[in-house]
Amino acid sequence: MEQAASSLPPPARFGATDRKDNWWAAPLTVLIALSAFGVYATFRVVQNAWYAIDDTASAHILSPFYSPLIIWDGMPRWLSPGMLILWAPAGFRLTCYYYRKAYYRAFFLDPPACGVGEPRRNNYLGERGILILQNVHRYFLYLALGFIVILTWDVIKAMMWPDGFGVSVATLILLLNTVFLGLYTFSCHSLRHLVGGRIDCFSCAAMGQARHKAWKGVSKLNSSHMRWAWISLFTVMLADFYVWMVSSGVITDFRFF
Amino acid sequence: MSSTAQLKIFRGDRNGGAMVDYEVPRTPGMVVLDAVHVVQATQAPDLAVRWNCKAGKCGSCSAEVNGKPKLTCMERMDKYPEGTAISIRPMKTFPVIKDLVTDVSWNYAVNKKIPPFKIKEGERKYYQYEADRVQEFRKCIECFLCQNICHVLREHQLKQEFAGPRFLVRVAGLEMHPLDTEDRTELIKDAMGVGFCNITKCCTEVCPESIQITDNAIIPLKERVADRYYDPIRWIARKVFGGNDSRQ
């Protein structure tokens, strides 16, 4: 028997752990991915250009970062239409139960990973204090549901070409984006609560059977909420990037029919 | 020649201790608890370890293996490569009594604060599809691995303010029961401190029964607290139309 120089509890310092795996990989990946998205989205909104494919030979294709397009005469030049609407989906994601987990770990290191020491800090309040505002998530959900309707209309418009019905790569990307944003929105924890999660006795409740089915459906989607969150984050960026590239003339949108 | 496993096991009590090296032969199907028992039988008869069923159902043998909370009776040794020592510590969140045995009595004190099931009057009938949701919570074996890994308890030591995931699961099982009439929303918000949970899901990651603690218990409870205390539209609706947060 050999005594090692270690004592209990492990010192409560940042990163202290007995874990042998790469526990830092997940929070680091999240940190990089969310930061990259934040930088890209901010740039595109401030850029205030190349957000629509609007030539006379094409269907009207609008970037999801700028939809719905709000412009009026005399609008200040510094004010981008994207700024007027992007706060809503951004708020939906910022207050999302999944993203909260992701950024509490990656950005606030609270905790950085399970069983890993946190940076020293006093007065931990969790989601009391200022973060009580996270409870506004349900209101951002209501707005996000409206955005799904608007983006669906954008997909329909992207099929209406000057010479009739048509589908291009841009149409498919907008469709893909709307599908994944829909999956992300309809798998929301607050929606799950709203449609039936708040009910204890479905057999006693008005329309209990229907609400139970709705709750089961949202629950099924909800089990992959993290997956939809990431895929939709990627597709919304892809859709905007594609519109940017086509509208700025870097590439040409290929029309299938 | 049989292979061996190197173990570093915490030896000590609440006044302190040290990690002590042991070496035991590996055998087919061996779990971490088996290895600890070999140490106890052959090298350290005074090594304290709590165990009972050896089937992952009693929740007694919880410890931290290589920094991760585990039921030692279910943790196979062949998961760990030979030649690297496996560290085995008691659960960090609870006071050590001796070696791998911790004092988890705080949990039982928290449990007593939860008002029991209060059955509704009249017809007592409900359906399996309504019971499914709460049956998940009944799988809990009270191993307290979730309590151990919860950073609110482990790092911030807020045992006075926060009940921990185990008891949020228990109260969810009561609150969501179709026949229960007790209202525990204020308790969940204040005495149990659900707001301290920042839903980082470590409890779910370590649950040996795969209970979706965060998604199915804690977040729904947070939403119920939001209904009652943080949703202005619902507040106005209650004032205008009367009633409380009916859960029907």
Image (spheres, helix red, strand yellow):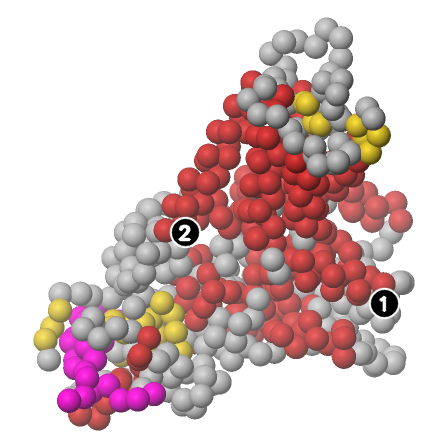
Per the rendered image, the range of residues in magenta is B1-29
Q: Which residue is mark 2?
A: A26
Residue at 49% in and 71% down: B207
Judging from the image, what secondary structure is the residue with disc 2 in? helix
The three-letter code of the residue at mark 2 reads: Ala
Residue at 76% in and 26% down: A59
- Picture coordinates of residue A19 (x, y %)? 30, 62
The answer to if A244 sits in the magenta stretch is no
Does residue B53 appear in this view? yes
Which quadrant is the C terminus of chain A positioned in? top right
Residue B50, located in which quarter of the rendered image?
bottom left
- Of all residues shown, which one is farthest toward the top? A74
Q: Which residue is mark 1?
A: A209
Q: In the shown orientation, is residue B174 left or right of residue B46?
A: right
Residue at 87% in and 80% down: B123
Does residue A128 appear in this view? no
